[in-house]
Image: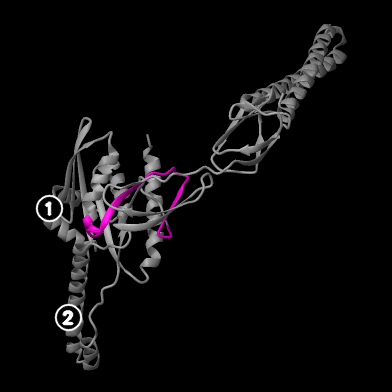
Amino acid sequence: MISSKAISTFRKKLKLFLFILFLPLSLFASEARVAYIAESGSYSSMLEDALSLLSGEITAEKTIDAYWAEREKRAEIAREEEVSSLRVSENFTSLEALESAEEIERDELYSSIVSPSFSDEERAFLLSGDEDAFSYLMMRKDLSILIAASLEEDGLMSNSSVLVNGEPVYENLFVSSDEESEFISLVSALLPFFKDENAVIVRVNVPGIVSVAIDGEVVSPVRSWVVLDRGEHDFRFTSPIYETADMRISVDDGIVIEPELVEKPGSPLFISTLPYDSEIYYQGMKLDSHFIDEADVPFQLTLVRDGFKTLTVQSRLPMTKIDLQLRPEWMDSVNTIEKAKDRFYTNLLSTMISFGCFVAAQSLSGIYTDAGLSPAVTLMAGVSVVGLVELIDSMFGYYQAARLGI
């Protein structure tokens, strides 16, 4: 299951992609701002996917007319205010120029997804389908299309409903295990607000590593779907694994595009390993050398050697050389070096203390010759020698763990 963090990351990347996509378009085309709200996170994700599939040039006449009617209305109000101001100031030259100015010319209309903030009260009004709330918020947020989607969860089945600009356009029993059908139904319900009747939803069944270009433009199918005008289109499928395939296809309702892709022949592959004498397994078969005459993709390589952790790698891309390095087993035990270091420092401390006691006992024995401290001096000397031997051993143990991995 996809985590909420992954979904959030995908949304951010999607919005960034759409911003980059529409930035150059905004220099010479008008922008229809589209916003949505949804109670459910999963349904919100489906809404974003549907809008990204429908994004681009708007050809739906109803939306275009509504967009320009609103813009012309606002322009007329601003013009009347300016005319009144010029008359009050008796600036007749500017007034004459303003009255002779041409009306707004319509140009291409593109959609862009925006994320205005709504209060809890505003969201409640929108989700309830209040038309006045839709009209008010669309004008205040400068929106062309506002979508509200609610999802009443009830076990495995939920009642989903969608409103666009205050008008109910979709209601369905949503089975949580069948998101694909819900997604297509949702796209079909929103399609008339973005594309005209000539548009059709087309499924493209290709592996994820295959790039799809339609009429010379590379596209990124959303959930393996694209929206096209009915009629003939040129398709090109390219991939590092498959031979390039060109097809001219006439698309209509219900069509599924599933090209026959031919795998490219395998290429020679050299496997560089460290250690060099590691055992190499290609697709589960042991190799006698570091060369493969024809390495078909995708392929799997496994490296094995005593004292090192087994390494398995997979590649979906053809290559002529691959570098693999095994990791010593001791490096997987994070406590090995720490234990050796602790032992070395402990012995160092105990040796310093024992030698200090030996020096002190010997000094006292020289001062108080009649005290009978000789046995104590002998004992301290023995302890100091044993500690010194242990210190030297732990020092070499620390060196071997840190430098040699033993």
* Picture layout, residue 325 above or below residue 65: above
Query: Residue drawn 75% across and 27% down?
Result: 399
Q: Nearer the viewer, residue 325 or 138?
A: 325
| Residues rendered magenta in the picture | 192-217
Residue under numbered circle 1: 130
Residue 209 among magenta residues: yes
Q: Which mark is residue 80?
A: 2
Q: Which mark is residue 344?
A: none
Q: How many marks?
A: 2
Q: Nearer the viewer, residue 304 or 141?
A: 304
- Image spot of residue 333 (x, y percent): 62, 25
* Picture layout, residue 298 above or below residue 342: below
Q: Amino acid at mark 2?
A: Glu
Quarter of the picture holding the C terminus: top right
Place residue 161 in its image quadrant: top left
Query: Residue drawn 18% across and 41% down?
Result: 172
- Image spot of residue 246 (x, y percent): 45, 53
- Image spot of residue 264 (x, y percent): 55, 44
Q: How is the image coloured?
A: one colour
